[in-house]
Image (cartoon, rainbow, N blue to C red):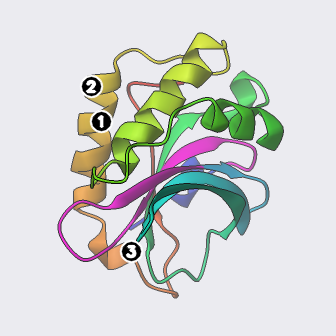
Amino acid sequence: MSDIRTFTVGSLYIAGFQQSGGVPHAGLILATTAKEGSIAHIKHQPSGWLYDFRKQRLDQSMTLSTLLKIHDVSAGTITSKELDEAARSVDIPPPTQSSECLNWTLKVVQVLHSRGLINLTSVQHLANEFLDFAGGNRDYARRTVFPNVKASANCS
């Protein structure tokens, strides 16, 4: 069962979306309300990778299964503009590379850390933590269930 008490509006999360294959799609979501957030992610199109920043529903999603909290609003506010600017500063992978969304997301996390917006202890440990947590959340990708939420041990 999702620990909804860990979810807080204004906090930043690595989001995991179920897709065909084993590894979930990853991006960053800044929760702007209890039901919606701003997502920064890259998506693979036939022409290559494309950066996307938009509103994202948090509830009633058929694919959103995981929210790993990497920054709680109580430690300071991160704005949608700051998230978008940090994400735009990270290069998009070449079109020939696949399964790059988590790597790109982690690079954005490193930028946020370098700008003093979050505190990251280890990017590799964060990657492993996300993959381990998201790997068990397939059942949360349903419209009737809120995504599984957990606070990261590697970020604040």
Place of residue 35 in the rendered image (x, y in percent of width and height, measured from the top left)? 72, 69
Place of residue 76 in the rendered image (x, y in percent of width and height, measured from the top left)? 76, 24
Answer with mark 3 or mark 1, whichever residue precedes in sequence: 1
Is 24 magenta? The answer is: yes
Q: Residues within 10 Å of mark 3 (few under 14, many from 20)?
A: many
- The answer to whether residue 152 is above or below residue 149 is above
Q: CA distance from mark 2 to mark 3?
A: 25 Å
Q: Amino acid at mark 2?
A: Gln
Q: Amino acid at mark 1?
A: Ala
- The span shown in magenta is 8-28
Q: Is residue 46 left or right of residue 113?
A: left
Q: CA distance from mark 1 to mark 2?
A: 5 Å
Q: Residue at x 70, y 37 (%)?
A: 83
Q: Which residue is mark 3?
A: 140
Residue 124 bears which disc, if any?
A: 2
Marks 3, 1: nearer the viewer: 1
Q: Which residue is mark 1?
A: 127
Q: Is residue 32 left or right of residue 97?
A: right
